[in-house]
Amino acid sequence: MQTTARHLPAEERRAATVETVVALAAEQNPGDITTAAIAERMNLSQAAIFRHFPSKDAIWQAVMEWVAERLLARIDRAAADAASPLAALEAMFATHIEFVAAHPGVPRMMFGELQRAEDTAGKRMARTLLARYGERLTLLIDAGKTNGEIAAAVDAAAAAALFVGTIQGLVMQSLLSGDARSIRTAAPGAFALYRRAIAATS
Amino acid sequence: MQTTARHLPAEERRAATVETVVALAAEQNPGDITTAAIAERMNLSQAAIFRHFPSKDAIWQAVMEWVAERLLARIDRAAADAASPLAALEAMFATHIEFVAAHPGVPRMMFGELQRAEDTAGKRMARTLLARYGERLTLLIDAGKTNGEIAAAVDAAAAAALFVGTIQGLVMQSLLSGDARSIRTAAPGAFALYRRAIAATS
DNA sequence: CGGAAGTAAGTGATTAATCACTTACTTTTC
DNA sequence: GAAAAGTAAGTGATTAATCACTTACTTCCG
């Protein structure tokens, strides 16, 4: 990590920059990440960053795109392998938890982007990601209802929001305890409760 | 509000400052609130702020104390009037939702304080508030179990985390829609799901 | 050699905090 | 009771630090 090749192709630098931002977000408030800090971590001068990104906002946009692509891809793969809608929801949950445990800065970045006052590119990406996430959840919940696994009385929109909230609650707990690993151990219990909330009474 | 008396007693100014910060946090990223913006909203010079607070960090500490006092007081009152543990949880939920609907900046401030890297006074207050909140929830959930309203199989710590997560999910939805009022209309559905998650199967 | 990648050294803008000083009100003293 | 003394509250100007971003130049490599 410390001795980066002096000259790297543009696309590799862009990717490395995004990964550096994700790593830094795990350690500090994403809003406080400076271009100087990114450059220092990459063993580059601050000015070099602007060879590959026109503005800091463009960096945030690239980071949010990175998150959206990776998270949705992993989640779709997990859901596709599941035997039933409810099993797919559980697999999505586990995959999402694994993702945020590996990248603890991601939920902070998401929340931070969402609460920006200005309409930045990064904020739009965060919205799009959450919207797509919600679509997938709603489809699965509806499928579970016709399947009989999920109670017909359950409000699909509310259940989708609770899915995200359940994860957010775990993130908050890990922020409180200061231990990012705690999210993994607490996850099964959290999903067990979520399943109780939506599952049909057998 | 626009024509403030030229000289105000210290304690009133401190209180007015805190309320101004809470109001500003509803409109913009709490981290981006400047002392100049606070002063402008109060029809004061930026320097005047520092007659009443030694530092900006001290302002955040006072704000978090304000939140902790008000929120816990309202929640305790609501829970005390309830007929049963589960009813108390529902009353707490409704009261909390009413609080964040009235002060949309509060959850943003909380999350923002929690994810600070440095150990600030404001961060400590946020932690304390959440810890006290969790205590109350755990007590109620345990009481509900002995009462028979809440399933014995439910993990009290996980259920307490889910309670907070459920609210956080609603906050996230309102951030997505950009409509702070949506949190009120979506709240009953969210609690209905939470009740399903923890209630004993009758 | 030539273009892509990198740097050192700037820029203007913004920020929290400080400074010397004024204003408005209260308390003391003869 | 009113002038003098004291004080809390407020101001405009300024400061040092930090930030994203730019410019002019150098180094690397096919």
Image (tube, coloured by chain):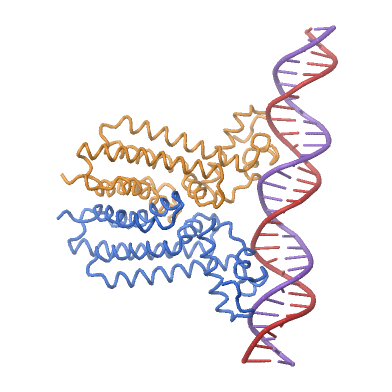
Chain colours: A blue, B orange, C purple, D red
Q: Which residue is drawn at 59% across and 79% down?
A: A10
Horizontal placement of B72 versus A117: left or right? left
Q: In this view, does A31 lie above or below B35?
A: below
Closer-to-camera residue (A4/C7): A4
Q: Where is residue A37 in the image (x, y as percent from the top left)?
A: 62, 63
In the rendered image, residue A132, in percent from the top left (x then y), is placed at 38, 66
Quadrant where the image shows the C terminus of chain A: bottom left
Q: Which residue is drawn at 54% across and 65% down?
A: A21
Q: Residue at left 33%, top 54%?
A: A162
Q: In which quarter of the image is residue A70?
A: bottom left
- Residue at the spot x=53%, y=46% of the render? B25
| Image position, residue A193 (x, y; %) | 27, 52
Horizontal placement of B56 versus A154: left or right?
A: right
Look at the picture and state if C13 lies above or below A6: above
Q: Number of numbered discs present?
A: 0
In the depicted structure, whether residue A151 falls above or below residue B57: below
Q: Where is residue A45 in the image (x, y as percent from the top left)?
A: 67, 70
Query: Residue A48's quadrant in the figure?
Result: bottom right
| Quarter of the image where the N terminus of chain A is located | bottom right
The front one of A176 and C29 is A176
Vertical order, B86 against A12 (above or below): above
Q: In this view, does B92 lie to the left or right of C22?
A: left
| For residue D11, side relative to residue B112 (left or right) | right
Q: Which of A175 and A136 is in front in this view?
A: A175
